[in-house]
Image (tube, grey):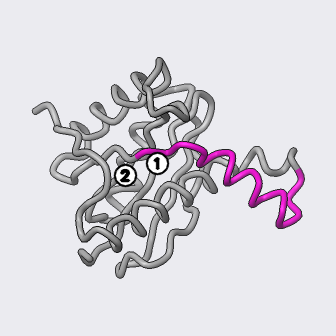
Amino acid sequence: MRRGRRIAIDVGDARIGVASCDPDGVLATPVETVPGRDLPAAHRRLTAIVAEYEPLEVVVGLPRSLSGREGPAAAKVRAFAQQLATTIHPVPVRLVDERMSTVTAAHGLRASGVSSKKGRSVVDQAAAVVILQSALDSERASGEAPGESVEAVI
């Protein structure tokens, strides 16, 4: 397993959840929720988070249907990831399958007693944690970086 902190991003229409892990890549934890409606401001904040955390890489959740197909939401996330990769270059960006991450995060929050109203403000962070933990577990099991690389346009 590669040593180094990672950042995960769960891109939504209104909010962007951010999570990170420890330098050993063992445990993912929430960082913050970035407002997502103003994309230039969101990219500035994400760039600042990347500069602060100095990650080995950034993983972005790619929404696919249960059958594995990609729809309009996936196209939007691919474009977002491409712009982010260009902005934070040379830090690598990878797209990882995020099927069911928000559902898993919402169930976990409800199971821990967080109300649905309060949960809205943290469910995106929790989804980013699910995405990152899945990516870390995948890398640990396979010995390879998770997902697919996003090339920066320089």
- Residue placed under numbered mark 1 in the picture: 9
Q: Residue furthest bottom?
A: 24
- Count the numbered circles shown: 2
Q: Residue furthest top?
A: 72
* Left or right of residue 31: residue 4: left
For the N terminus, the image quarter is bottom left
Q: Who is closer to the viewer here, 49 or 56?
A: 56
- Residue placed under numbered mark 2 in the picture: 59
Q: Tag 2: Cα neighbours inside 10 Å, few (<14), some, or many (≥20)? A: many
Coordinates of residue 127 in the picture (x, y in percent): 60, 51
Q: Who is closer to the viewer here, 113 or 63?
A: 63
Q: Tag 1: Cα neighbours inside 10 Å, few (<14), some, or many (≥20)? A: many
* Left or right of residue 115: residue 59: left
| Residue 66 counted in the magenta span | no
The amino acid type, in three-letter code, at marker 1 is Ile
The magenta region covers 97-115
